[in-house]
Image (tube, coloured by chain):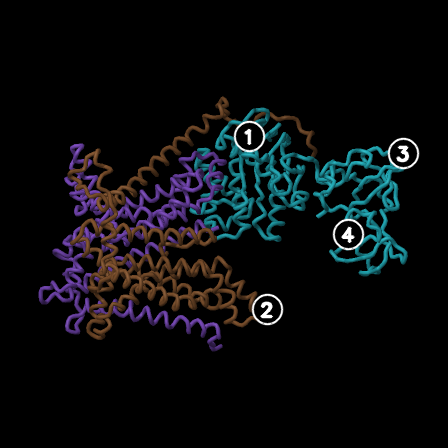
Chain colours: A purple, B cyan, C brown
Amino acid sequence: MRQRITPDARLGLLVALPFLAFVALFLIYPVVVVMIASVTSDGEFTTESLQKALAGTYGKGFANSIILALTTAVIGGVLGLLLALSVKGLERPRWIHNTVNSWSAVASQLGGVPLAFAFIAAIGTQGIITKIFMNLGIDINEFGVSPTGFWGLVVVYLYFQIPLMFLVTLPALNGLRPTWREAAAVMGASPLRYWRKVGIPILTPATLGGMLLLFVNSFAAYATAYVLNPGGALVPLQIRFLLQGNVISGEEDLGYAIVTWVIILLLSSLLLMTYLQRRTLRWTAS
Amino acid sequence: MTRVVMSQIRKTFGESIALEDFSIIFEPGDLVCLLGPSGCGKTTALRILAGFENADSGSVTVNGEDITRVPVSKRHFGMVFQDYSLFPNMTSRENIDFGLKAQKRSSAQRTEIIDRMLFITALEDQADKFPHQMSGGQKQRVALARAIATEPNLLLLDEPLSALDAKVRESLRDEIRRLQKEIGVTTVFVTHDQDEALAIADQVGVMSRGRLEQIASPRDLYEHPVNPFVASFIGSINRFVAIAGDQGMWGVLNRWVMSDRPSVLGDTAVLGIRPEELAVDVAGDGNARITDISFLGPVTRVSVEFADHATSQNPEVIADLMSAECARLSVGDKVQVRVRDDVTSAIMMSKPESEAFTESESIVHVN
Amino acid sequence: MTATTAAPLPLQSPLESPASPPRNSSHKPVNLTRVFRWIYLTLLGIFFAVPMLAMARFAFQSVPVALLTPDKLFTGWSIEPLMNALTDTQALNAARISVTLAILSILINLVLLIPLAIVTEIKAPKLRPVLTAVTLLPWVVPPIALVVGVSATFRASAPWFLASIYSLVPFYALWALPFTYRALDAGLQAINAKTLYEAARSMGASFTTTVFKVLLPNMRASIVAAATLTAALVLGEFAFASLLLKETLPTYLVNFQRSDARGGLALAIFILILTALVIGISVRLMRKRGLNISSTGL
């Protein structure tokens, strides 16, 4: 039998085409051009640029960015999960759920210039927290907690990472059915055993998925890092450096190669995340 | 086998009273259904029995031993939940194993028990499947296997069939009954479905507003309900105004019947007559008119409307007749409705007029 | 079997019933975790509040931190820096541009996605996985990566395009796409759009009537949510505007702060509160209507 195009399918195509054309023109086309450029030189296939992009200063940039992203993903992931667990377990007062929920929706979007300013005012050299600790005889900047230091950046990123983790893991937590705990108890299991055998295994994919999202979110963050330390050796800042024409001749393709690596890294993280999320959904859907 | 007694349980949630002076005995090996409308306290009773809730006062004993304050995990019960509650990260086999591991049994023993459980619930081919790969009926069978694998003292079933569709519900119902008799575990089954309760239970406890109204065998419950609530909750019942004659008899429609209350001559009361206790004959000068006929297989349900509304407490009276007798009836026919000759007693649905007519139970409606 | 036949049997399996503990002891561990929960929530609250308060102090109190002593805590406060920042013509100009960009991005997204979301829900469910995949793309291609591609392509082929401030619009619309689609989809799910549509059609309403008279009015809440989330995103976007050298509110803010530190922070607070209010109010509004809007776009 020949496949016929139904009116419904035609309508679907009709509304999908402008949308897909839009995405293709402004997103797919530039990305594909960059990715092709990153593996060709004078029309020949070459991985030279891709290799260069992972060497020297730029390799260091990738290492820094990945370490920063991993650190904020793990710490933010744990703290965000704890936040979700704390709020979930509190039935009283009722406002706490809505407040934390709304605040997280807001704070997870607050990365950017104003946030960077806020932390300069708090833990910068002229910051009030720096001053308070100074009076106590502790120089927090010495421990790397300054807006330009590694741990300072981690602290700033946590400001939006913790709420994001809260938002991502709350559905999974709500998917933990009270009857699982009850069933375990009836069968003679201690709360500890319930968590070890049921609770934690069920939450693990969602937690890992959430952390991957935090990783992506942190790796791609630009504004905060730029305001705090424009010269820092992080991938987004290096891309800016290259984009503004600071290129030694013969390295024009370097920026393209870095972007290609970024997209490969983020794409694989997100694919893994969707896989983990699907598993969580399968387990916790009613 | 285990005898479980709940006595004088009281439980409140804030202002609302969930259970009040609730006492019940579960005899060894019995399957007892707790039946009642939603909010009647049956689930609370089960949760107190399981240990998920603490009663405000009263006690629970198992074979004479007070377990009111024993934590859930030490009670050695089994439980099946409405939502299956299988652990989604474990296969059927691992789900069944969960309780056995908690009992610290040897691995050989566990394997043997699991295999036996899978066999008696006909789940051998589902052994290594995860819950999301199984149908509702299969999941609930795994939940049942998991609950009985630990050889519990008491098996608790919380509306285990209400998430399933009609056909599966019926076959699983029979399976629960068969398994329960086979292993002889004392079982408490909470449901709001009276057909389910009547079909499966040795004893049915009818609950209403936090109290146990009556506990009896299904047949006793149907034939000798202790109050109007039970009478109208179990099966259907028609209400007729009856007049007291002498010798304690009550006149309802055409017949003199006995009731559980003495009568004073000339007194009036409302009596309940079951649909199958009525007979319907075509008669041009009859007392009622047929408004609807529905064929239900062997039985046909005929709805009639009485010309004199004072006779019947309900606008509509229903009569269940043998289908073979109904061929000549059609909607709109004038008919004579009477109580069948073999009916000798009826249930009192209200206090006689002579007594205070205040209790709200007299306005419980037939479904 | 009746309720009185069997005699009580001896205990079959051991019930290690401990001496019944007094009732309130079973509540104690619960209270302890409660205390830990509150301690944790309080600590997080402090973490979230302190930077904001520090920024407010810096902006609105004219006492340098080096000279700040406890007795000077309440001196020198004024909202003058904010007033100065807000009356600056360049700031107003940047704000006007950002608002225009936000409105245009919202419009593009709604025009592209409302028909698509509706058709996907009621006519062509096969499009759903495609849409889900596409809405993940903005996570994969962050602004800092896309800007390289845009420079590599449009700068050569359509220089007039990148010269215009409005060249930001399609890209802002792209990043807001996941939020918009999630919000619209949640709205359609919440009103049971497919059933609603079939009911309307069965009563003889035409496709267009059904969409305009039944579906769209019922989607108002989720359209508002999509719009506010998009607006918040556009008002905060820095990377793309900065790298394409456009002056929007965030890029202006960075430049302004270099010349007027306190005024810059005052303006930042103003923008933050505005953004927070916009997102917060819309999220609460949606929740009141039973809509679970994903503010993460996932």
Horizontal and vertical percent for residue B26?
A: 63, 32
Residue located beneath label 2 in the image: C203
Same subunit: marks 2 and 1:
no
* Residue that carries the numbered disc 1 in the rendered image: B55
Gap in angstroms between the C-alphas marked 2 and 3: 64 Å
How many C-alpha atoms fall within 10 Å of the one at disc 3: few (<14), some, or many (≥20)? Answer: few
Give the mark, 4 or 3, whose residue is nearer the N terminus: 3
Q: Do labels 2 and 3 touch, CB within 8 Å? A: no
Same chain, labels 3 and 1? yes
Labels 4, 1: front one: 4
Instruction: Say few, some or many: other residues with alpha carbon within 10 Å of mark 1 (under 14 / 14 to 19 / 20 or more).
Output: many
Q: Nearer the viewer, mark 4 or mark 3?
A: 4
- Which mark is in front, 2 or 3? 2
Q: CA distance from mark 4 to mark 1?
A: 43 Å
Q: What residue do we see at 20% from left, 69% from top?
A: C152
Amino acid type assigned to the residue bearing label 2 in the image: Met
Q: Chain of mark 4?
A: B
> Is tag 4's residue or tag 1's residue first in the polypeptide sequence?
1
Looking at the picture, tell me which residue is in the foreground, B259 or C270: C270
Look at the image and tell me whether residue A251 can be seen: yes
Quarter of the image for residue A200 reads top left
- In front of the other: C26 or C207: C207
Query: Which amino acid type is marked by label 1?
Result: Ala
Chain identity of mark 3: B
Q: Which residue, given by chain and number where applicable, does mark 3 sit on?
A: B247
Q: Secondary structure at mark 3?
A: loop
Q: Count the marks.
A: 4
Q: Chain of mark 2?
A: C
Relative height, residue A129 to residue C164 (above, below): above
In the rendered image, residue B334, in percent from the top left (x then y), is placed at 86, 58
Could you tell me the amino acid type at mark 4? Glu
